[in-house]
Amino acid sequence: MIRPFTVFAALHSALLLLSFGETAAEWNPPSVVTTDDIRAASADVLGRPDIPLMGEQGWEEDVVRVTAAGMQWDIGMSVHRPDQDDDITIGADGRKVGILLLHGGSGDFKSMHRQARML
């Protein structure tokens, strides 16, 4: 059974690899991405060595306390980033590339660690 996230990651990887070498101003998505293209791009990405991540578990946790509606709310988050700053991807605009993953509710946050590791 193919997991939806694996399909997303493979498609995302294929689009990135098919556009490699072009600048952001020139890039246009390919009109057709074949299944073989997706499989090849996915195999390429999954075959790369893991990048060491910060934290003992591969992430660092943080909690922010916000006061709203007369109550205090603790908002927990985890930050997944490479151990070495040189391993952080830089976009065409010269800025660090990042992504924000939101979970769907109570207990669902644990699935975000797996997805963040894949990305």
Image (cartoon, rainbow, N blue to C red):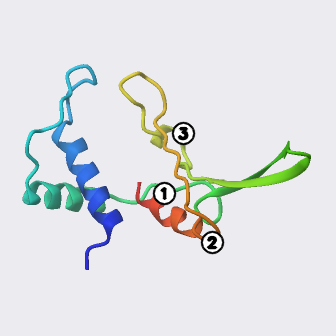
Asked if residue 18 shows in the view, the reply is: yes
Q: Position of residue 46 (x, y in %)?
A: 29, 62
Question: What distance separates the C-alpha of mark 1 from that of mark 2?
Answer: 16 Å
Disc 2 target residue: 107
Query: As shown in the figure, which amino acid type bears the numbered disc 1?
Result: Ala
Foreground disc of the pair 2, 3: 2
For marks 2 and 3, the one nearer the N-term is 3
Find numbered disc 3 in the image and state the secondary structure of the residue it sits on. helix
Q: Position of residue 103 (x, y in %)?
A: 55, 59
Q: Mark on residue 74?
A: none
Q: Residue 36 or 45: which is nearer the viewer?
A: 36
Side of 50 relative to 100 (left or right)? left
Asked if residue 47 shows in the view, the reply is: no
Residue at the (54%, 44%) spot, across then down: 84
Q: Quadrant of residue 107?
A: bottom right
Q: Residue furthest front?
A: 69
Disc 1 target residue: 116
Q: Are marks 2 and 3 in contact (CB under 8 Å)?
A: no
Question: What distance separates the C-alpha of mark 2 from that of mark 3?
Answer: 31 Å
Q: Residue 31 or 86: which is nearer the viewer?
A: 31
Quadrant where the N terminus lies? bottom left
Q: Residue 57 or 102: which is nearer the viewer?
A: 102
Disc 3 target residue: 85
